[in-house]
């Protein structure tokens, strides 16, 4: 029976581990993360899945610790897999698996190598992304590609909408690729990294809206970081406002006076610097205080 040690976290980790089980892979150890205190845990638990399947499971602070490598070496796995595990696996681990180590990445490599690829793809207005199963090497997300599956990004899709599609794409790619990996017939192809891009992690502060940007760029930021992510925000008339859902309104034109926020009946709109208008479908203001700054259609200036 083909065996594996699996580093996994999040929904992609749960679904890909489920594929391994369905395909009869002997999962000899699962390595996952402890949930971070204060983090919004909106996703499924790899540790809970491991418990249900009676797989040995550990949650090391440092996956590169020598004692973990010793334990994995004693298990003599055919493969190492990494499914949305948050740390890169070092050479000490990658050399253990007799038939290689493979990672599932949430983009169509070589585009969007690095961290939070789904959110970056939405921020940049991409119309498609996907999942890529690739060989793990020392350089992040740079190994040979086993297989890919694309998914569409619709104009109003949120980061969560796209992440859910990428999760399914990951499951499809792994299920389709496993027979070839196990049989030794999978045809891997080199990446041309010059045709791709690398992006780092994002912080909650990166959700601050720059109102000098075009309406489409602001819309893309809002939907990319909408809940369960921290959300886009702006300080408007001294009030911290989270803007959670927007839509570009092609039939409205921005009014004179520069970028500004105004209310029309019970609806809020933002005039943007490029002359386009955003409908603010869902907003949160501290204590509901923003409403006190708008009477009728009076515009609140946006810096």
Image (cartoon, rainbow, N blue to C red):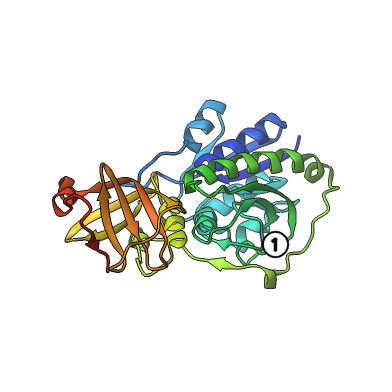
Q: Quadrant of the C terminus?
A: bottom left
Q: Position of residue 177 (x, y in %)?
A: 76, 43
Q: Which residue was labeled with disc 1?
A: 143
Q: Is 195 on the left-hand or right-hand side of 125? A: right
Which image quarter: residue 143?
Answer: bottom right
Could you tell me which residue is drawn at 68 percent across and 29 percent down?
A: 22
Q: Quadrant of the N terminus?
A: top right
Q: Is residue 199 above or below residue 135?
A: below
Nearer to the camera, 135 or 98? 135
Q: Is residue 207 above or below residue 35?
A: below
Nearer to the camera, 234 or 134? 234
Question: How crowded is the residue under tag 1: few (<14 C-alpha within 10 Å), some, or many (20+)?
Answer: many
Could you tell me which residue is drawn at 49 percent across and 47 percent down?
A: 156
Q: Is residue 170 above or below residue 218?
A: above
SS type, badge 1: loop
Q: Position of residue 129 (x, y in %)?
A: 62, 52
Nearer to the camera, 190 or 99? 190
Please count the marks in the image: 1
Q: Position of residue 296 (x, y in %)?
A: 19, 49
Could you tell me which residue is drawn at 66 percent across and 59 percent down?
A: 109
Q: Position of residue 215 (x, y in %)?
A: 43, 61
Which residue lies most toward the top here? 52
Which image quarter: residue 136?
Answer: bottom right
Q: Is 234 on the left-hand or right-hand side of 127? A: left
Which residue lies most toward the right here? 185
Q: Is 186 on the left-hand or right-hand side of 52? A: right
Nearer to the camera, 111 or 283? 283
Could you tell me which residue is drawn at 66 percent across and 56 percent down?
A: 108
């Amino acid at each position: 029976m083909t065996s594996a040690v699996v580093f996994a976290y999040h929904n992609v980790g749960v679904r890909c581990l489920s594929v391994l089980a369905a395909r009869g892979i002997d999962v000899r150890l699962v390595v996952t993360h402890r949930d971070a205190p204060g983090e919004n845990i909106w996703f499924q638990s790899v540790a809970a899945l491991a418990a249900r399947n009676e797989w040995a499971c550990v949650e090391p602070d440092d996956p590169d610790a020598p004692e973990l490598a010793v334990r994995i070496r004693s298990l003599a796995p055919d493969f190492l897999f990494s499914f949305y595990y948050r740390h890169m696996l070092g050479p000490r681990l990658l050399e253990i698996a007799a038939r290689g180590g493979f990672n599932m990445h949430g983009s169509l490599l070589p585009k969007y190598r690095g961290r939070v690829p789904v959110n970056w793809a939405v921020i940049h207005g991409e119309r498609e992304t996907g999942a890529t199963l690739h060989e793990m090497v020392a350089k992040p997300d740079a190994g040979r590609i086993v297989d890919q599956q694309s998914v569409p990004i619709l104009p109003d899709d949120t980061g969560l909408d796209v992440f859910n599609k990428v999760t399914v794409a990951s499951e499809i790619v792994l299920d389709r690729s496993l027979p070839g990996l196990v049989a030794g017939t999978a045809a891997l192809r080199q990446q041309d990294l010059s045709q791709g891009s690398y992006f780092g992690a994002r912080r909650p502060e990166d959700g601050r809206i720059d109102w000098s940007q075009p309406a489409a760029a602001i819309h893309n930021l809002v939907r990319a970081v909408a809940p369960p992510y921290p959300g886009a925000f702006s300080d408007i008339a001294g009030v911290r406002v989270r803007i959670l859902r927007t839509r570009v309104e092609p039939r409205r034109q921005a009014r004179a006076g520069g970028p500004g926020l105004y209310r029309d009946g019970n609806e809020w709109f933002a005039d943007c610097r490029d002359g386009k208008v955003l409908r603010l479908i869902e907003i949160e203001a501290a204590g509901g205080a923003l409403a006190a700054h708008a009477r009728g259609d009076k515009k609140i200036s946006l810096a």
